[in-house]
Amino acid sequence: MTSPDPVAAAVAALVTALQAAQPPTQTVAPQRMLTVKETAECLRCSESLIYAQLKDGRLRGVRVGRRRLIAMSEIQRVTEQ
């Protein structure tokens, strides 16, 4: 009878330890993203004001190609201030 391979046993123990140490994955719900025009309509202001606030950093957005998109959560953050 042969003894188990010590390298295979060490690898198996390492894999088990790494799997136990991994935090459970969380699924994040996708956020609704609004265009500058939709954001301006939602906040009842001009598009130029939205662009100015994006430029100043008072409003955070992302650039997708040539478009600027603002998360709905960002609009809520601004309106709560």
Image (cartoon, grey):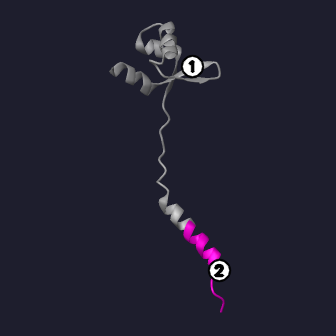
The dot on residue 40 is: none
**Mark 1 residue type:** Arg
Q: Residues within 10 Å of mark 1 (few under 14, many from 20)?
A: some
Question: Which residue is at 47% across, 16% downward?
Answer: 39
Distance from disc 2 to disc 1, alpha carbons, whole Å, reads 57 Å
**Residue 6 counted in the magenta span:** yes
Quarter the C terminus occupies: top left
N-term mark: 2 or 1:
2
Residue found farthest to the bottom: 1
Q: Element type at marker 1?
A: strand
Residue found farthest to the left: 80
Q: Position of residue 18 (x, y in %)?
A: 53, 62
Q: Nearer the viewer, residue 61 or 33?
A: 61
Question: Which residue is at 52% across, 14% downward?
Answer: 55
Q: Residues within 10 Å of mark 2 (few under 14, many from 20)?
A: few
**Residue 18 counted in the magenta span:** no
Question: Which residue is at 58% across, 71% downward?
Answer: 12
Q: Which residue is mark 2?
A: 5
- Write the start and end of the magenta stretch as one range: 1-14
